[in-house]
Amino acid sequence: MEQRQLGRTGPRVATLALGTMGMSGMYGPADRAESIATIHAALEAGITLLDTGDFYGMGHNEMLIAEALAGRSRDQVLLSVKFGALRGPAGEWLGYDARPAAVRNFLAYSLQRLRTDYIDIYRPSRLDPQVPVEETVGAIGDMVKAGHVRYIGLSEVGATTVRRAAAVHPVCDLQIEYSLISRGIEDGILATCREQGIGITAYGVLSRGLISGHWRTDRQGGAGDFRAHSPRFNQANLGENLALVEALRHIATSKGISVAQLAIAWVLHQGKDIVPLVGARRRDQLREALGALEVRLTAEDLSRIEQAVPPGAAAGERYPSAQMKQLDSERA
Ligand SMILES: NC(=O)c1ccc[n+]([C@@H]2O[C@H](COP(=O)([O-])OP(=O)(O)OC[C@H]3O[C@@H](n4cnc5c(N)ncnc54)[C@H](OP(=O)(O)O)[C@@H]3O)[C@@H](O)[C@H]2O)c1
């Protein structure tokens, strides 16, 4: 698989990366054996970057990755880990903690669960409003010096925070939602990252399945599925959003590809500094996502896509309102 450089100072990684969140309950139940088979299939296809969070299934996701990587050489894969989200025993969300002591504490536990002695890219999942980002990044920088972390990343922060963080320590990438229906980063964040030499790892490129071409009006997110509470999936907005998908399907069919492949290819065509994190949790989904690497979009294709789904076309915000308020990226 072709490689892309993550920012001016970051590692080279395969053009598509795999995010494993959906394998630990965030989208309802997942099959453990199929999850591990999907991680193996991703590595065999040439994917090199796996993204997780210590709070995905309260450690479940990291332990799953460790099991999938058992017996493999550690340097064949890059691990990106998010930390900072606090959860309770019933899975409830309790806020964020990105104080320097918390950074070291979270990291120590992640290293154990991942059965490794270093993490390739370590990042706070959200800005902790109580802690200046300089302190959080400074603390991760100390962990880089100590050899426990290789690179520093950010997640869902705005342009001002990106600049403040990068002034303390080189930042290799900003992980942020970016898709045909979530284009907020085009209003300044993407330009700031480019100016600062910071890459983008784009998540939600299929908008959590909404624009995969496989979501149906009669499908409900079950218990523990983020989508059960997501404004874009609720009944008031779903029909409008799936109408956008049908417009995309028309274009995809004319090119002999699937809607998911068109949506991933569109992100791939937005710049060589962008690496989509696909959220496949089964091998068939992974195969479909990998097909996007073969898709070439002409200027005419791109303009048809933009006409079918203009910026701001989605009905509903990308997170429920309480979670929108936690996004520094939506403030700057
Ligand atoms: N930094 C952050 O704040 C943040 C937030 C969210 C995610 N992330 C990271 O980004 C990764 C990807 O995010 P995401 O899960 O929202 O991504 P996504 O790729 O937009 O959505 C993945 C979901 O789409 C559905 N799907 C249908 N066809 C698919 C196909 N061909 N390939 C892949 N998925 C298909 C699947 O749902 P069904 O199986 O239910 O059909 C799958 O779980 C996560 O795993 C996580 O590592 C980061």
Image: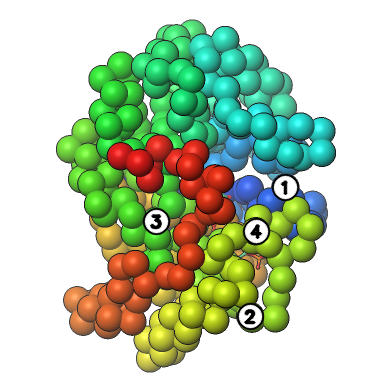
The answer to which of marks 2 and 1 sits earlier in the sequence is: 1
Tag 1–tag 4 contact (CB < 8 Å): no
Q: Residues within 10 Å of mark 1 (few under 14, many from 20)?
A: many
Q: CA distance from mark 4 to mark 2?
A: 16 Å
Q: Which residue is mark 3?
A: 178
At 40% from the left and 18% from the top, the residue drawn is 132
Q: Quadrant of ligand 1?
A: bottom right
Q: Which quadrant would the N terminus be assigned to in this image?
A: bottom left
Q: Residues within 10 Å of mark 3 (few under 14, many from 20)?
A: many
At 82% from the left and 39% from the top, the residue drawn is 90
Q: Which residue is mark 2?
A: 216
Q: CA distance from mark 2 to mark 1?
A: 23 Å
Mark 4 residue element = helix
> Is 32 on the left-hand or right-hand side of 188?
right
Mark 1 sits near ligand 1, with its Cβ under 8 Å away: no
Residue type indicated by callout 3:
Tyr
Residue type indicated by callout 1:
Ser
* Quadrant of the rendered image containing residue 280: bottom right
The answer to which of marks 3 and 4 sits earlier in the sequence is: 3
The answer to which of marks 3 and 1 sits earlier in the sequence is: 1
Residue type indicated by callout 4:
His
Q: Which residue is mark 4?
A: 229
80 vs 4, nearest the viewer: 80
Against 133, residue 287 (above or below) is below
> Is 42 on the left-hand or right-hand side of 204?
right
